[in-house]
Amino acid sequence: MMTTQRPGTKGLIFNEPNVWDKSREGRCAVSLPKPDVARAPLDASLTGDAPDLPQLSELDVVRHYTRLSQWNFGVDSGMYPLGSCTMKYNPKTNEIQAARQGFAGAHPLAGDDCSQGALRLMYDLEQYLAEITGFDAVSLQPAAGAHGELAGMLIIHAYHAKQGRQRSKILIPDTAHGTNPASATLCGYKSVNLKSGPKGILEPEAVAAIMDEDTAGIMITNPNTLGLFEEHIKEICEIVHAKGGLVYGDGANMNAIMGVVKPGKVGIDVLHLNLHKTFSTPHGGGGPGSGPVAVTRELMPFLPVPRVEKDLDTFKFVADCPDSIGRLHTFYGHFGVMVKAYAYILTMGAQGLLDVSRLAVLNANYIKESLKHTLNLPYDRPCMHECVFNDANQQSHHITTMDMAKRLLDYGFHPPTVYFPLVVDGSFMVEPTETESKEDIDQFIDAVKAIAKEAETDPEKLTRAPVLPKVTRLDEVAAARKPCLRG
Amino acid sequence: MFMRYLPHTQEDIRNMLAVAGCSSLDDLFKTIPDAVKVKDGMDLPEPLSEWELNEHMENLASQNIACKGYTCLIGAGSYDHYIPAIIPYLVSRSEFATAYTPYQPEVSQGTLQGIYEFQTMVTDLLGMDIATASHYDCGTALAECALIALRKNRKADKIAVSDLVHPSHRQVIDTYLKPAGYEMVRVPHTKDGLTDIAALEAMDGIAGVAVQSPNFFGHIEDLAGFKKMADDKKCLFITSFTEALAWGLLKKPGSFGADLVAGEGQSLGITKSFGGPGLGLLAGTSKLMRDLPGRLVGRTKDANGQDGYVLTLSTREQHIRREKASSNICSNNGLNAMTAAMYLSTIGKIGIREIAQLNHDKAVYLKSVLTDAGFEPVFDPPFFNEFVMKAPKDFKQKRTDLINRHCLFAGLDLAPYYPELTDHYLFCATEKVSKQQMDQLAKEVA
C-alpha cells in the first residue's frame, strides 16, 4: 500500500569540507572582463591586502553548494508541518516572474517615470491585501514579519503621541509569538502578560480587568498559536477601544481565514501579514520574507514613507506625510518578494484563496481527529489551520516531544514546531497547510502512530533518533558555552 | 474546484470532512461567530492561467526602464554588478530556497554550514571578529548598531551620525530611535565632501559615532581619526558601507578598530530588484558578541562526535528572552546571505581584487571624460567607484533624453538629498560599464 511506505529512506550522503579547505592558491571561478581603460592605482596608504577568500574552480563551487543543499530538507523535499510557519508549496512560476529583467534589474532610484511597472505592481498588491484583510490601506515596506510588527507598534505609538498622551503598557496574551513583546519593547512599552482562558482563547472579562487608560492596546494573534479562533474578538476590541487603546493583530496565521474573516472589519486597527507564509513566497532557510502592515483609515497618516500613490493612471512615491512613523527600510521593502505574492494572488483569485483557507483548516482538523487518540490534545476543540498536541501520553515511557520530532526525521518528515506555544507543556504543533494531499497526510499520521508505538515497545529508537540524516543530535550546550562562529 | 496547487479531490474532501466530524467546508468554521464572518467575499481580479500571468507580468516588467543591456551609472546603495551564471543556478536549489529557518539542525546542515561559511567570509572581508547570519539591509543593520551602542552606554541618549551616511539610512535610524526617546545628532560635512571630525569634538553625551566609508559621495573617510575620537569620547565607533566590493581594495574597517560594522551586501551576487531584498551585514568585535542582534551559526559536534552546525547564543533572541531580547528580528535575509557566500567563493581572493580594481579604474575614467565634457569635479578626496560632479546647466534635459533614447541612467540628482547641491550628480561606474559606453555618454553631454 502506498500509504504505509515512509518517504524517508537511505541514500548516498556526500561529505564536504568547509569551502576554504578546498582552496588552492591561484584558482578563480569567475570570468573577468578585459580591462579597457587604464589602471588607476589608489594611494597605497588607502589599500589593504585582498580578503582571504577561498580560491576555487567553477566546478569546486558548484559541487560544494550542491552537496550542502543535499543535506537540507525543504518543502520540495517533503511534508513540512511546522506550526505557525505555513510551509506551503512555493509555486515556481512566481520565481520566474520575479526574475524578469524589468523587475530584477530595476534600480530603486531610477525615478518614478522609469519605474511605473514596479509602482503599479506595488499599488495593486496593496489594494489586494487591503481587500483580503478588510483594511483601508497597506504599506509593503516592512521586510519581514517581525519588521511588520515593529511597524504596527510604531504606528500605535505614534497614534498615542498624536492624541497628546503617551501610554506605557501593552497587553500580550500568553499565546503570543516571542517577537510580540520584543517589538513592544522597541517602542518603550512594558509587556503585560494576559492569560488565556480554559478553552484556550481569551476571555473578555480578563481583558476588561486589566485594560486601563495607561495601556496602549493589545497584541492579538487570531487564529491564535493554539490554532483556535478567538471567538470573542469583537467584544475584546470594543473593551480596548472603550479605554482609548488600539488592537494590534498578528496576521501570521492569516492562512486560516482568507475569505472567511476580514480582521479589519471586526475591530482590529492594525495588522501585519507574512507574504512568506500566507502568500506562498519561499522562506529561503531564514528569509528574505516580507511583512506588509495594514491599517484602518484613522491610522493611515502614520504609515511608513514613502507611500505609493495613484494619480490618474500614473503612480508615484510620496514622502511628504508629517505624521508618518518614518522610513523603515533603505528603499521600499522586499520588492522581489512582493512580485511573487502578487503573482500568487493573481493566480488564485478570490475563490482560490477561500479554498486555500478551507483546505488548510480541513487538513488540520483531519490530523487533529486522526491523532487525538495517539497524542494528547490539551484543547479538544475544532481548530483552524493548525493543532497543538503534547507528549503527556508518552511521558510514562520517558519519551519527550523532542524524541518524537527527531524520530519523524528518520521517517522522512520535517517535524512540527516543538515547545511552542509556551502555554502548552511539550507542545507538538502541526500545521499541514492546504498544499499537502490526503495521501501525504495519511503517511504522516501513520508515521506518528508508528512512532508512538515505538515509544512503548522500543523507546531507544526515539532517544537515539535521528539515525538517517547526515548528523544526529547536536550538542547545542557546548555550541553556546564555547562559541565557534567562524572558521 | 480545480487548481494546480490544491491536491484535494471531491472524494478526499468528503472523506476528510467525515473524519473531522463536519458536514461541509463551511462547517469547519463553526467556532467563528456569524457576526465576524465575511458576507461579501473578496473583490479580487479573476484568476489568471500561467500563460495569462506571463503576459501580464512581462507587460508590467517592461514598464520599468530596466531592459537588457541598459546602462546604470547610479549606485547610491544599489549597484549594477555582473552576476555569474552559477549564482542564480545554485541559489535556486530548492533545498535551500524552500527550507525554513534551521530549527531542526539535523536536516538543515546545508543552510547551517553555508551560513557559517558566510559569517567567516564576511569577517575576512571586513577584518572583524564576528559577523551575524544577516539582517534586512544596511539601513536596519545600522539602526540596530545604534541601539547596541545606546544599550552599552546607558548614561548617553544620543548617537552622532555623519551627514554623509546614506540619507535613507539616517531616516531608518531616526525611526528606530525616536520612540524610545533617543536622539540622532547630525555631524556635518566639510567642503571637501568628508565628515567634519572637528564638529564631532564638541559633542557630549553620545553613545556612538557612525560614519560611512566610502561615504554617500563616494569618498574614503579617515576611519582611524574617527576611531580615535570615539575612544576619546568613550563611545562605540560604528562604521557602515553600501558597496561591499570596496573591501577588495581598501583597508578593512576592522583594521581601524571599528567596534561595529553595518553594511549592504547587495553587490555580492544579488540583483538590484528595485531595492530589495538586499543583504544587511552586521559585524562586531568579540567583546560585543552577546550584544549582537539576530541569528548566529556556531560549530559543534553531534552525539557521534561528527562536526556539525547549529543556531547558537539564542538566549539573546526574542523567542527566548521575549521583551528583554537584543532585537525583535526573527527571519533575516538568509537566502541572500547564501547567495553572497556563493558569490564570494566564486570570485575568490584573486577575483575580488581584480573586480574592485576594475570598478575604481572605470570610475576614474568616467570622471575624467566627464570633466573633459564640461562637468566640474567639485570634490577632491580619493573615492572607490562613486563620485560627485557639478553638471552643466543643460544636463537635466540631456539626462532625460539619454534615458529615453539609450536606456542610460547618467548619475543621481543630489538636490533632493542635499538641497545646497543643485546641479550636482552622484555617478557610479562598475566593472559592467565599457569604455565605449562612457565615451558615448561624454560625447552626448558635451
Image: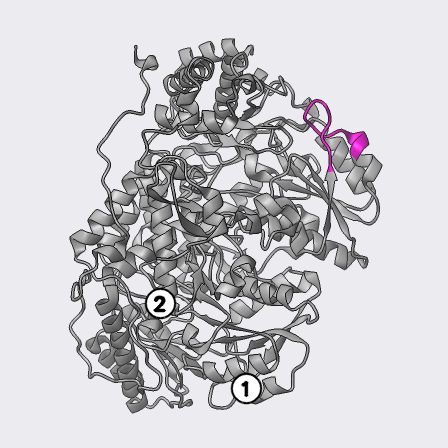
Q: Is residue A472 left or right of residue B230?
A: left
The answer to which quarter of the image holds residue B234 is bottom right
Q: Is residue B49 visible?
A: yes
- Magenta segment boundaries in residue numbering: A194-206
**Labels 2 and 1 touching (C-beta < 8 A):** no
- Label 1 Cα crowd, 10 Å radius (few <14 / some 14-19 / many 20+): some
Where does residue B230 sit, x and y in percent of width and height?
56, 79
Q: Is residue A432 visible?
A: no
Chain under numbered label 1: B
Q: Residue at x 30, y 37 (%)?
A: B51
Above or below: residue A70 compared with residue A373 = below
Tell me the tag on residue B197: 1
Q: Amino acid at mark 1?
A: Ile
Q: Could you tell me which quadrant the C terminus of chain A lies in?
A: bottom left
State the residue in front, B221 or B149. Answer: B149
Above or below: residue B180 compared with residue A352 = below
Q: Which residue is mark 2?
A: B125
